[in-house]
Amino acid sequence: MRPARLVVYSDYLCPWCYVGTIRLHRLEDEFGGDLGLEWRSFLLRPRPDPNRTFEKFVAYTQSWLRPAAEEESAGFRVWSTQEGPPSHSVPPHLAAKAAATLGGDAFERLHPRLLRAYFVDNHDITALETLRGLWRDAGLPENEFDRIDDPALFKTVVDQHNEAIELGVGGVPSVRSADSDAVITGAHPYETYRRWVAKLIAT
């Protein structure tokens, strides 16, 4: 037996990625040190869309009701604030990457907060002040928040997105074993993920 390591391509603006994250974190809790997750960036909205109005965005969030029905613990809420619409996928990824550079559990503290802030609390996680507030709430040092402006982090986000495209990823969440280029796409049922991980550990 050996530990399994999964590479997860995900986007903070993707409702199914929120569902997948909850299920994969459950796997971490169950398998403990036998499972490791590495989160990589995928950009569903790589750049701002000037034609996306607030009204269109609010109407779009009605589509969250479908993943909400599949994962009740996620606590999805159709958009109910006056924030947004979110600009593009890059800002929250930069914040998450900046947290990761701090080491320890900094990334793990910020990562779920980004998703919950968007899909449950309806905050615009592409807004700088929102990201700064979440950084603070995660207990990360405020004087390190400016790490998000590091061009190297932007390059990492883009490189990871391009890596996913080269592997044939057309949607997220997408997961692969670190030992393989074969990608499983979609927020699969927990038991499906569980059987796969158990098989990886057993081989």
Image (cartoon, helix red, strand yellow):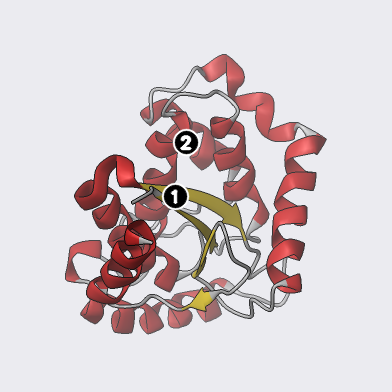
Disc number lying in front (1 or 2): 1
Indicate left or right for 49 with 144 as reference: right
Answer with the quarter of the image where residue 74 lies: bottom left
Give above or below for 183 relative to 146: below
Indicate left or right for 32 with 156 as reference: left
Q: Is any atom of residue 47 visible in this view? A: no
Amino acid under disc 2 = Phe
Give above or below for 203 relative to 39: below
Give above or below for 103 relative to 148: above
Whole-number angstrom distance, CA of label 1 to CA of label 2: 12 Å
Depth order, front residue of 153/8: 8
The tag earlier along the polypeptide, 1 or 2, is: 1
Q: Which x, y percent locates residue 186? A: 45, 78
Number of numbered discs on residues: 2
Q: Which x, y percent locates residue 47? A: 75, 64
Depth order, front residue of 176/121: 176
Residue 107 is labelled as: 2
Q: Dot 1: within a 10 Å radius of its alpha carbon, few (fewer than 14), some, or many (20 or more) residues? A: some
Q: Secondary structure at mark 1?
A: strand
Residue 16 is labelled as: none
Q: Which x, y percent locates residue 154? A: 76, 44
Q: Is any atom of residue 113 visible in this view? A: yes
> Disc 1 marks which residue?
37
Amino acid under disc 1 = Leu
Q: Residue at x 23, y 73 (%)?
A: 191
